[in-house]
Amino acid sequence: MEKKSRFVAVGPAGRPKSPVRNHKRRGEIVEIAFMHKAADMGFAVTKPYGDSEAYDFIVDSGSRLWRVQVKSCAFRKGLTYQLRAAHHSGNIRAAGPYTADQIDFLAVYIMPVGVWYMIPVNAFTPSTCLCLLPHLPVAAGKYEQFREAWHLLACKRKGKLRTGLVTSPECDYSGLIEMWCTGCEGE
């Protein structure tokens, strides 16, 4: 009988290595992490039945329902974490870029550094390959403005937010001076 070690293997920054065996399992774990993080901030999170939709979750901020697709990246290629921002319709050849008719946000979790990106679909479509730089200063990449940008889901422009909703920074929309936050610009 093989004796198991009592020591935990650690990866970068002393984080325990994930026991993730394959991409499907990693996706399931990251979806659970997304639900926990969003619910902890006060959002209501709903998981649609089945895998037929382009989005994984519906997030309720009280003023709006958002369709969110969750992705993850576990490895860096050179200086960037790269991920494919495309959907599949059951046929690998039918893959295509996400559109605003399918999702509102792409939530990306970079596993080795524990960072979330909340990227509005209009910020990346029609691109299907995103390069993220969570290990560099915020100004370093095209999508870095969306690093930990959970406040984009809590925009005040469309009505009253859920009680107890906490994001940082808060949406700074002011109806008196019609100043829009980045979450509601262009709507």
Image: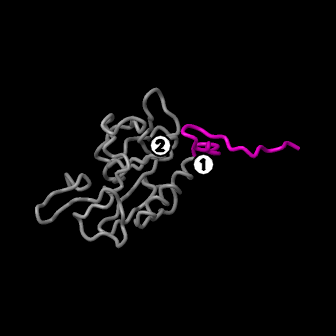
Query: Split into 4 quadrants, where in the image is the N terminus?
Result: top right
Coordinates of residue 113 in the picture (x, y in percent): 49, 42
Coordinates of residue 89 in the picture (x, y in percent): 46, 47
Q: Main secondary structure of the magenta part?
A: loop
Q: Quadrant of residue 53?
A: bottom left
Q: Quadrant of residue 164?
A: bottom left
The crowding category of the residue bearing disc 2, from other C-alpha atoms within 10 Å (few below 14, some 14 to 19, many at least 20), is many
Q: Is residue 117 visible?
A: yes
**Tag 2: residue type?**
Ile
Picture residue at 54% right of the left edge, 49% below the top = 27
Q: Residue furthest right?
A: 1
Label 2 element class: strand
Asked if residue 115 lies left or right of residue 125, the reply is right
> Is 93 or 156 nearer to us in this picture?
156
Label 1 element class: helix
The crowding category of the residue bearing disc 1, from other C-alpha atoms within 10 Å (few below 14, some 14 to 19, many at least 20), is few
Q: In the rendered view, tell whether residue 117 sits above or below residue 137.
A: below
Cα distance between the residues tagged 2 and 1: 15 Å
Task: List the residue tagged with mark 1.
Answer: 25
> Is 96 or 31 nearer to us in this picture?
31
**Tag 1: residue type?**
Arg
> Is 169 or 155 nearer to us in this picture?
169
Q: In the rendered view, tell whether residue 37 sits above or below residue 160.
A: above
**Which region shows up in magenta?**
1-25
Query: Split into 4 quadrants, where in the image is the C terminus?
Result: bottom left
Q: Earlier in the sequence, mark 2 or mark 1?
A: 1
Q: Residue furthest bottom?
A: 163
Residue 8 is a magenta residue? yes
Which of the numbered marks, if any, corresponds to residue 110? 2
